[in-house]
Image (tube, rainbow, N blue to C red):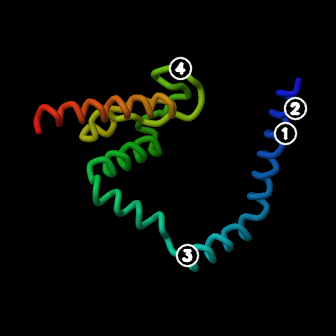
Amino acid sequence: MAGSNVEQSEYNNTEYQRAYRHENSDKINEYRRKWLAEKGYPYRESGKEYERLHPTKAKARIILHNAVKEGIIKKPENCEECGKEGEVIGFRYDDNEPLDVLWVCRRCFYYKNKAKQEEVNEQRRYVG
């Protein structure tokens, strides 16, 4: 019974926040503009640095994002690895094939990425 009250409370809070943002969008946007004018754009700089260090990954991410946005690729509702419902992330085995993705939840993405990194490290041991 307590679980349903918590869920209802979270739902009401989310609805309230959406309504507030909708009704006060001008006020919120003005606040953001002022904040960014004072503090600058720190995230933009870090994004550019990432693109400079990892150009293939950055390009693959943009290509996939645009394909999903244009409807060329449809994001599934469930993780293709464990079947969990919710937000899924595109996992690429090869950044040179940006549209060849496995749609996984954050947990599966973490473990897939970890396994991929261990494989790369193992190959480096034999080469180097």
Q: Name which of mark 4 and mark 1 comes first in the sequence.
A: 1
| Residue 5 - label | 2
Q: Name which of mark 3 and mark 2 comes first in the sequence.
A: 2
| Residue 120 - label | none
Q: Name which of mark 1 and mark 3 comes first in the sequence.
A: 1
Label 1 environment density (alpha carbons within 10 Å; few <14, some 14–19, many ≥20): few
Q: Residue at x 34, y 62 (%)?
A: 49
**Left or right for 87, reference 122:** right
In the rendered image, which residue does mark 3 sit on?
A: 39
Pick the front one: 117 or 95:
117
Question: Where is the C terminus found, in terms of image quarters?
Answer: top left
**Left or right for 126, reference 18:** left
In space, the residues marked 4 and 1 are separated at their CA atoms by 28 Å
Pick the front one: 103 or 117:
117
Amino acid tagged 3: Lys
In space, the residues marked 4 and 3 are separated at their CA atoms by 42 Å
In the rendered image, which residue does mark 4 sit on?
A: 83
As drawn, which residue projects farthest toward the top? 82
Pick the front one: 49 or 122:
122
Tell me residue 32's x, y (percent).
63, 70
Viewer-nearest of discs 4 and 3: 3
Label 2 environment density (alpha carbons within 10 Å; few <14, some 14–19, many ≥20): few
Amino acid tagged 4: Gly
Label 1 element class: helix
